[in-house]
Image (cartoon, grey):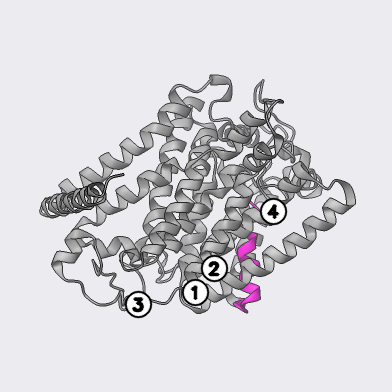
């Protein structure tokens, strides 16, 4: 590279930055309806990539296979057939694996054609992921003043392309809704929608649909947040008892047998299981030694993760708190499929913080996590391992990449929480900074009751 080339690149970068600020100023001057319309178009265009791949060009025998499981559970409730014995059609032959309350919630799906359910479920996932970005990124998004809708859309776009998120769209999964429920329940300031809802209720409802949000109850107990823990447990208990009264046979079948059968979830040693246990099942050691090592690693990682969540809670950083506990739901669980890593959306914004423009290292760290999970590294590993003549170690490393990536994300969360504060987000911005989205842009105003305008 010649001596002149670095200067050319700097001048080009400055020119792009000036052009971006000019565009931002122009868009900020548009009517609000036009800015919202632009944001909707951006989200739709971003969603088009996974939607076209998985709903238009995907093989029909693999189409929305998980939402088909939910719908068939609803059909079972309506027709009286055993919920936990019914299977989806061949070739998948998938059983229902969730608690009975989830089957009750699936009843409305049974009244709609399966094709329509797949499209509606996908639209709901896109909306839920956008809402996750809104609540996880509020410290950053609200700094951009009149550009808030467009900022939200631009930040949502790459999140829809993350491997765990697009996998959720591929299968028709529930993880977007689980992440959104837990994030809304723990985020401070509390969302305006939940002004009259006691903290812990949404976590309890999420536990009644899928057991893994129970990691938040552990977090409550470790921090002596007795009221929230009790609310979550009582909520889960109440809806579980209600489901038991409606579906006594299904409840006995689940709590008395199906819950203890890990084989119902699929092959635990398969590449899709990116929990610590899945990692060890693939690389060893086998048998008792592997089980002991798994328990030791669960204890170590759990201690670190919950300590990190405790620090975030005490620091008033509820986004990092949710991100850390969410990673525990993946790493500590015996089975955690790739789409369970929807928590990475929260992790990215926890690392970004309130004003990454004043701490560019946060931008780099968040970019590392985003770039890592934009790649489909475990499947690259499977492709590598399909060539016996190639060395096996790189393929094994790629195959288990999301487990390692989750641990890296946990380390970066720790690093971000130990960064010194760089700005006072309550200070009103200058108008020019707000329009450019740069340092000091925007502000987030709380209502007198402590709730968020969101």
Q: In which quarter of the image is the C terminus?
A: bottom left
Residue nearest the viewer, comparing 32 with 206: 32
Q: Which residue is drawn at the image coordinates 49% and 66% (left, top)?
A: 320
Between the residue at mark 1 and the residue at mark 2, the CA separation in whole angstroms equals 6 Å
Q: In which quarter of the image is the N terminus?
A: top left
**Mark 4 burial class by Cα count in 10 Å: few <14, some 14-19, many 20+:** some
Judge by depth and name the residue closer to the eye, 8 or 100: 8
Q: Main secondary structure of the magenta part?
A: helix
> Distance from label 3 to label 1 (Cα)?
30 Å
Instruction: Check disc 3 and report the residue beneath it.
Output: 449
Residue at 24%, 63% in the rendered image: 438
Is 25 placed above or below 221 here?
above
Residue identifier under label 4: 333
Counting residues from the start of the chain, the first of labels 2 and 3 encountered is 2
In the picture of the structure, the residue carrying the numbered disc 2 is 414
User: Quick one: 247 or 283, which is closer to the camera?
Assistant: 283
Q: Are marks 3 and 4 in contact (CB under 8 Å)?
A: no
Q: Which of marks 4 and 2 is nearer the N terminus?
A: 4
- Relative side of 295 to 435, left or right: right
In this view of the protein, can residue 35 be seen by the observer?
A: yes
């Amino acid at each position: 590279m010649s001596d002149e080339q670095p200067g050319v690149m700097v001048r080009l970068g400055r020119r792009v930055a000036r052009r971006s600020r000019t565009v931002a100023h122009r868009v900020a001057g548009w009517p609000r309806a036009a800015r919202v319309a632009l944001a909707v178009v951006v989200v739709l265009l971003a969603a088009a990539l996974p939607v076209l791949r998985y709903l238009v060009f995907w093989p029909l025998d693999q189409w929305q296979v998980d939402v088909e499981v939910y719908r068939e559970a609803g059909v079972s409730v309506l027709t009286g057939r055993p919920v936990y014995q019914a299977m989806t059609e061949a070739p998948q032959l998938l059983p229902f694996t969730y608690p009975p309350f989830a089957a009750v919630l699936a009843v409305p799906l049974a009244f709609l054609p399966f094709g329509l359910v797949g499209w509606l479920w996908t639209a709901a996932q896109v909306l839920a992921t956008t809402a996750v970005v809104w609540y996880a990124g509020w410290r950053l998004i609200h700094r951009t003043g009149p550009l808030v809708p467009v900022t939200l859309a631009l930040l949502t776009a790459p999140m829809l392309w993350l491997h765990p998120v697009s996998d959720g769209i591929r299968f028709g999964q529930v993880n977007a809704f689980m992440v959104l429920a837990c994030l809304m329940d723990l985020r401070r300031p509390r969302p305006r929608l939940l002004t009259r809802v006691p903290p812990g209720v949404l976590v309890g409802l999420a536990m009644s649909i899928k057991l893994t949000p129970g990691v938040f109850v552990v977090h409550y107990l470790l921090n002596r947040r007795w009221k929230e823990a009790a609310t979550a447990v009582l909520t889960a208990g109440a809806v579980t008892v209600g489901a038991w009264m409606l579906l006594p046979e299904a409840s006995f079948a689940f709590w008395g047998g199906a819950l203890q059968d890990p084989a119902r979830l699929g092959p635990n040693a398969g590449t899709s299981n990116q929990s610590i246990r899945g990692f060890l099942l693939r690389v060893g050691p086998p048998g008792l030694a592997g089980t002991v090592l798994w328990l030791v690693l669960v204890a170590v990682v759990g201690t670190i993760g919950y300590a990190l969540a405790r620090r975030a809670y005490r620091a008033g950083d509820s986004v990092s708190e949710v991100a850390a506990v969410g990673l525990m739901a993946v790493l500590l669980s015996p089975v955690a499929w790739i789409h369970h890593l929807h928590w990475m959306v929260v992790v990215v914004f926890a690392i970004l913080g309130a004003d990454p423009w004043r701490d560019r290292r946060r931008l780099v760290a968040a970019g590392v996590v985003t770039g890592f999970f934009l790649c489909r590294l475990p499947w690259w590993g499977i492709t590598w391992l399909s060539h016996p003549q190639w060395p096996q170690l790189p393929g094994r490393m790629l195959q288990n990449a999301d487990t390692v990536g989750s641990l890296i994300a946990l380390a970066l969360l720790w690093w971000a929480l130990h960064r010194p504060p760089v700005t006072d987000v309550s200070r009103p911005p200058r108008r020019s900074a707000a329009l450019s989205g740069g340092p000091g842009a925007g502000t987030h105003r709380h209502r007198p009751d402590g709730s968020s305008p969101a």
